[in-house]
Image (cartoon, rainbow, N blue to C red):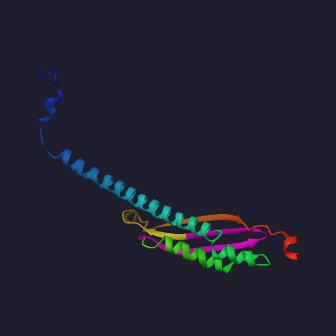
Amino acid sequence: MRHLFPLPGRFGGPRDGKFLFTFALSLLPLTATLGCAADYARVLHITAKLQAAADNASLGSIAKRSPGFKAAGSMMEDGVISVGIADATCLFQRQMTGVRGYQLDSLTPLVAKAGSSLTSTVSFTAHVPSRFLGLLGMRMVTVQGVASSNGRLPQIDASAIQA
């Protein structure tokens, strides 16, 4: 009967600690892997928040009721719209209020008019500190993003202005 069921007999065999040592040794890479995954998830979460803020700043800075759109409507020549740049910066910072766990290195908004076209580009670079990846020599993870939006000014009939 013992030859029919050899496996159950092994569990009651010698207990010299090999299993415990192997299990303890396997916990080290398992813990490191889970920690790195948690760091990576945090970096992705913060990157998504930063990108959403850049998207909103880019769109909001040339929206029809924005200061940049109004300033572009009164400009006679093409060029950079400084009030739109200030508005994009404010919109980005307002969106990121309360978000922690990153260091913003650069924020570069550009709002410009070319003919009847408006263009807004917001780019950023930030560092996210890591906890477990720091054990592997990666103390900071650099993230970057760019958001662009285009809009058009309404066409004004030249004959209506002359009359």
Image-quadrant location for residue 40 = bottom left
Q: Is residue 46 above or below residue 90?
A: above
Q: Residue 57 at x, y = what percent?
A: 58, 69
Locate the N terminus by quadrant.
top left
Looking at the image, residue 152 sits to the left or right of residue 33; the answer is right
Q: Residue 71's spot in the image, x, y percent?
A: 70, 78
Q: Position of residue 115 (x, y in %)?
A: 79, 70
Q: Residue at x 61, y 69 (%)?
A: 122
* Side (left or right) of 20 relative to 152: left
> Which secondary structure dominates the residues rendered in magenta?
strand
- In what quadrant of the picture does the C terminus appear? bottom right
Q: Between 71 and 94, which is closer to the camera in this rendering? A: 71
Q: Is residue 91 magenta?
A: no
Q: Residue at x 65, y 64 (%)?
A: 149
Q: Position of residue 139 (x, y in %)?
A: 42, 68
Is residue 116 shown in magenta? Answer: yes
Q: Which residues are magenta?
A: 99-124
Q: Residue at x 36, y 54 (%)?
A: 33
Q: In terms of depth relative to the viewer, which is nearer, 162 or 148? A: 162
Count of marks placed on residues? 0
- Among the 4 quarters of the image, the one containing residue 5: top left
Q: Residue at x 19, y 48 (%)?
A: 20
